[in-house]
Image: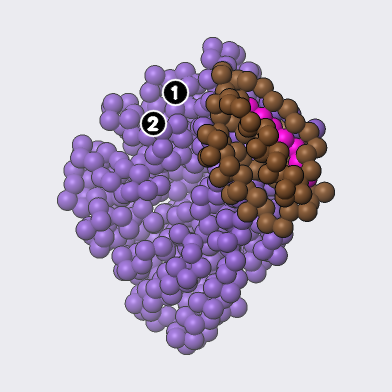
């Protein structure tokens, strides 16, 4: 039978170390909404989302109450809208109208974000997909809760450099369209290589076409829990360090598994995957950078950071896969800058640069995330950074992503405040040498040799 | 049977157990096990109870929370599974 010590340990994780279920994300397929008439398409989308997700927020609240574990967000992901809208949309404006519908539906069912305003263009863009990408600045500036993602590369297909070039322009344009709010629109826009179909985390969540009609994916988090556990093994060997991370990740994932099963059975919707990601928040003690520092670095960004992160990411996965048969999504350690107090401090202390962050993305679970850069950065430079990050993902057969925020009207050293979970960030310097001639080449970078496994 | 874990944490004072137990008895909640200890000067109690006959878990939780506030302790009600899942394979 459960004893007092175990109960105290669990509740301490929740109350003091910020253990939480970060999100219950309901994936909804919109493939059955496809219609050649835009108005009818919008009606069908609104109806499908508001019907399927009507009990999502209330169920999340009830589970929270029953188990005493905070469930921070309830969210929705939908089929990439580029596919859903292709038959009806003749222009970027038509697509932006669908973004408006998604926003209304999200507000109606009480979720804080809806993801899937997306296009998957790793090899080429259809006319519809290009329209969707060109509509992103307008869509994100006119809505509050819509999140957008574009997959521009994969290990199997290579990197679509035409899409990379276009995304550099669109990120800058989104920043311009939302400059009154410190270019906040870009915080809801992510560029992927090897995007997973079942990621529950925003801004990159979408409901892949390989998925069923509706599915529950759950994201658990708990950097504070890992940090706290590691405080007790200071100076011990790598074996003890790894064992501690693994055991902690196991415990955290088991809670997520319970919540996922409960949500699935109460909503009558199949359980998809559990994503165990150490997702930091700006709250003190909820930081991935602090874990790296606890492992033995003076500051995140110091020599040894990439190795420490590689170790952390791997042990988190190993603990997680033992705890649930369906671990998926991104699972690992996120390294966003603005959402992690330790990262912010490291940037301000001069310990962490974009170049070091890029190296870290070779071994973390995602990529260059929530990094504020000067608003006068050229579109081609942004495309160059995206291309680098996509290459890391393509060659290493992993998911990588870029979520950069060129803050219009601000320059290196200034701070930008996004609010809430998105946090705040110092604007980081970007390499000023040009990559115009590289980015302006047309076509795509071919898939790497090791992708040919057939 | 629906096993629920009730935890009471706070400054030790007269009548904590009595207050909680009286409330549980009035609401047809059977106590299966109680353990209690003092950690760093703080009163820590855990009860395993059967809430199978309780109509609204939400009400039970909020009323116990309220009793906790009255006597200056924190009372939490959680289904047993969260602990079971985390600590048992």
Residue hosting label 2: A342
User: Does B48 appear in magenta?
Assistant: yes
Per the rendered image, the range of residues in magenta is B44-50
Write down the chain letter for disc 2.
A
- Secondary structure of the residue carrying tag 2 is helix
State whether residue A390 is above or below residue A284: below
Mark positioned earlier in the residue sequence (1 or 2): 1
Chain in purple in the render = A
In this view of the protein, can residue B29 be seen by the observer? yes
- Could you say which is closer to the camera, residue A193 or residue B33? B33
Q: Colour of chain B?
A: brown
Asked which quadrant contains residue B14, the reply is: top right
The residue under the point 61% across, 60% down is: A59
Q: CA distance from mark 1 to mark 2?
A: 9 Å
For mark 2, does the 10 Å Cα neighbourhood hold few (<14), some (14 to 19), or many (20 or more) residues? many
Q: Residue at x 53, y 66 (%)?
A: A78
Residue identifier under label 1? A293
The answer to whether mark 1 and mark 2 are in CB contact below 8 A is: yes
The N terminus of chain A - image quarter: top right
Residue A383, magenta (yes or no): no
Q: Determine whether, in the image, residue A139 is placed left or right of residue A12.
A: left
Position in image of residue A80 (x %, y %):
51, 67
Q: Position of residue A328 (x, y in %)?
A: 63, 48
Towards the viewer: A68 or A26:
A68
């Amino acid at each position: 039978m459960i004893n007092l010590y175990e109960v105290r340990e669990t509740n301490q994780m929740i109350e003091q170390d910020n253990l939480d279920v970060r999100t219950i994300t309901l994936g909804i397929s919109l493939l059955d909404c496809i219609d050649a008439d835009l108005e009818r398409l919008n009606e069908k989308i609104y109806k499908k989302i508001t019907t399927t997700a009507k009990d999502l927020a209330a169920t999340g609240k009830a589970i929270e109450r029953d188990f005493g574990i905070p469930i921070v967000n309830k969210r929705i992901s939908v089929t990439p809208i580029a596919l859903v809208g292709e038959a009806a949309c003749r222009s970027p404006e038509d697509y932006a109208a669908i973004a408006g519908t998604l926003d209304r539906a999200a507000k109606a069912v009480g979720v804080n974000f809806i993801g899937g305003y997306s296009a998957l263009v790793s090899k080429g863009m259809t006319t519809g997909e290009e329209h969707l990408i060109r509509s992103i600045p307008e869509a994100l500036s006119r809505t509050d809760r819509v999140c957008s993602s574009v997959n521009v590369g994969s290990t199997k297909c290579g990197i679509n450099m035409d899409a990379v070039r276009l995304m550099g322009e669109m990120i800058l344009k989104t920043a311009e369209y939302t400059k009154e709010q410190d270019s906040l629109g870009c915080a809801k826009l992510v560029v992927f290589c090897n995007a997973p179909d079942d990621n529950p985390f925003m801004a990159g969540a979408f409901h892949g076409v390989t998925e069923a009609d509706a599915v529950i994916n759950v994201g658990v988090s708990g950097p504070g829990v890992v940090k706290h556990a590691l405080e007790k093994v200071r100076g011990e060997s790598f074996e003890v360090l790894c064992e501690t991370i693994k055991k902690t990740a196991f415990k955290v994932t088991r809670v997520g598994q319970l919540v996922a099963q409960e949500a699935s059975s109460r909503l009558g919707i199949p359980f998809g995957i559990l994503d165990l990601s150490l997702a930091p928040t700006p709250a003190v003690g909820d930081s991935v950078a602090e874990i790296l520092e606890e492992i033995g670095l003076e500051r995140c960004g110091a020599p040894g950071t990439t190795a420490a992160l590689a170790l952390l990411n791997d042990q988190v996965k190993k603990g997680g896969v033992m705890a649930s048969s369906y671990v998926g999504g991104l699972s690992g350690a996120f390294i966003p800058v603005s959402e992690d107090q330790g990262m912010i401090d490291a940037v301000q202390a001069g310990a962490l640069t974009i170049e070091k962050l890029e190296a870290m993305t070779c071994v973390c679970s995602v990529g260059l995330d929530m990094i504020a850069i000067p608003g006068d950065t050229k579109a081609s430079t942004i495309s160059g950074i995206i291309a680098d990050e996509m290459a890391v993902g393509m060659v290493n057969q992993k998911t990588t992503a870029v979520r950069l925020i060129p803050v219009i009207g601000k320059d290196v050293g200034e701070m930008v405040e996004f609010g809430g979970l998105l946090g705040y960030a110092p604007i980081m310097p970007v390499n000023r040498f040009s990559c115009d001639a590289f980015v302006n080449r047309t076509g795509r970078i071919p898939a790497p040799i090791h992708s040919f496994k057939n | 049977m629906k096993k629920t874990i009730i935890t009471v944490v706070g400054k030790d004072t007269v009548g904590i157990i009595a207050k909680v137990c009286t409330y549980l008895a009035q609401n047809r909640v059977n106590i299966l096990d109680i353990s209690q200890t003092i950690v760093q000067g703080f009163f820590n109690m855990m009860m395993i109870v059967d809430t199978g006959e309780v109509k609204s878990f939400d009400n039970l939780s909020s009323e116990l929370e309220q009793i906790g506030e009255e006597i200056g302790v924190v009372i939490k009600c959680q289904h047993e599974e969260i602990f079971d899942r985390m600590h048992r394979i």
